[in-house]
Image (cartoon, grey):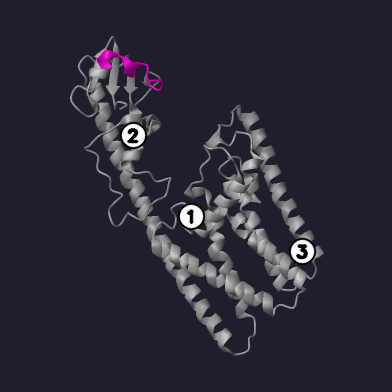
Amino acid sequence: YKSGKTIGTYDIWNTIFFDGMFLIALFMKVISGEISTVSDYAKAGFSYLISLAGGLVLWAVLRKAFMALKHIEAVAYKGMDEAYSLAKLPVRFAVAFKAFFGFEFEGINALRYLRCATALVFVVAVVQIVVLLIKNSAKLSVKLASLVGLVLLPVGMEVVYFLSTSSEYQVDTLMLYGDIFVVLFPVILIQYLEGQTFSENLGTKLLKIGTWVQIICMVVVGVGYIYLDNAAYMKASITQEESIAYFTELTTRIKSCEGFEDDMEIILVGWDYLEDETMVDISPQEQLAGIKLEKYPTFKELVSYPGSINFIREHLAFGNDKVIKDDDGKYAKMPEIKAMPSYPDDGCIRVIDGKVFVKMGQEE
């Protein structure tokens, strides 16, 4: 329960994904004969639920203690501070099932061959489950109970979609740890099937062929992920280098502006509307086209993102308290600013009334 002991909100994803693992464990106990009654199934499920809840409670207590010790406050992350609306719960179920059965996994399987291979792995796994249940000697009621648990497995894998009903809440790639069970569960099924004896018939032969297809698909997915992982890191590195070069030029032009003094306020105007036709986007290149992960923005998205002032501060050591963004559009309404061209055109940086104004863009 290491995940339940971590402090950050981000790490709580790891803990809640144990519910998918618990559902798989319940099914395996049924087909192995460890659970023989519905009552035993319910007791085992309840014990798992208590373990999961215990990890979450421990995380919450340690988080609260750490925040008190360090005198920090939690931020409103993705709208998760808003009240939960039970009326929207059915919608969240629909979203979770759609996300699972689309097999795209928020950009992880952006390429069609990965989605198809993952879908084949899932379909064969369903057949394997049916075969194991038919072959198993457990009571029908126990089998049905285990099936109910497996029907809920997609929800267990995609439980992150239920954490908030806020309109601001968005699930991104790095929150989908639970989807790994799409590949791990079939591995468990294959291992269990290896220890079973089947009479030789057409059904058995088709099951073997399907299992080999499943194994090949998992290998394809694994190799595909390795390639895309490396491509994603390369893309992130290139994007960072491009951004550092872009902002280095921007800071150089600010400091070389006529009349600039280092004690002046620097006002960044219209950052939300930055439109620089000189920027080149590397994403469409064939080697990087499959990288659709939300955490790896394109170069254009990064430099035009208002929060990039933090990037400038952390990577270029530029931007003290006197460097501010015109968030409310107060300065953008000034006649002098309206008359200025937008960055990077000549005249986009001017000293006006003892302040340095950088016009990044203008609202249409």
Sequence order check, earlier mark of 2 and 1: 1
- What's the magenta region? 326-337
Snapshot quadrant of residue 245: top left
Q: Residues within 10 Å of mark 1 (few under 14, many from 20)?
A: some
Furthest-bottom residue in view? 200
For the point 23% across and 25% down, the residue is 253
Q: Alpha-carbon distance for marks 2 and 1?
A: 26 Å
Any magenta on residue 331?
yes
Quarter of the view holding residue 180: bottom right
Which residue in the protein does label 1 denote?
Answer: 105
Residue receiving disc 2: 304
Point out the image quarter for the C terminus: top left
Report which residue position mark 3 lands on: 41
Amino acid type at mark 2: Ser
The x, y position of residue 108, in whole percent, is 44, 55
Residue flagged by tag 3: what amino acid is it?
Answer: Tyr
Sort mark 3 into few (<14), some (14-19) or many (20+) by Cα contacts within 10 Å.
Answer: many
Q: Nearer the viewer, residue 249 or 207?
A: 207
Identify the mark nearer the N-term, 1 or 3.
3
Neighbourhood count class around disc 2 (C-alpha, 10 Å): few under 14, some 14–19, many 20 upward: some
Tell me whether the residue at label 2 lies in contact with that at label 1, contact meaning CB atoms closer than 8 angstroms. Answer: no
Q: Among all residues in the image, which is located at the extreme top?
A: 353
The local secondary structure at tag 1 comes to loop
Element type where label 3 sits in the image: helix
Say which of 133 and 247 sits in front: 133
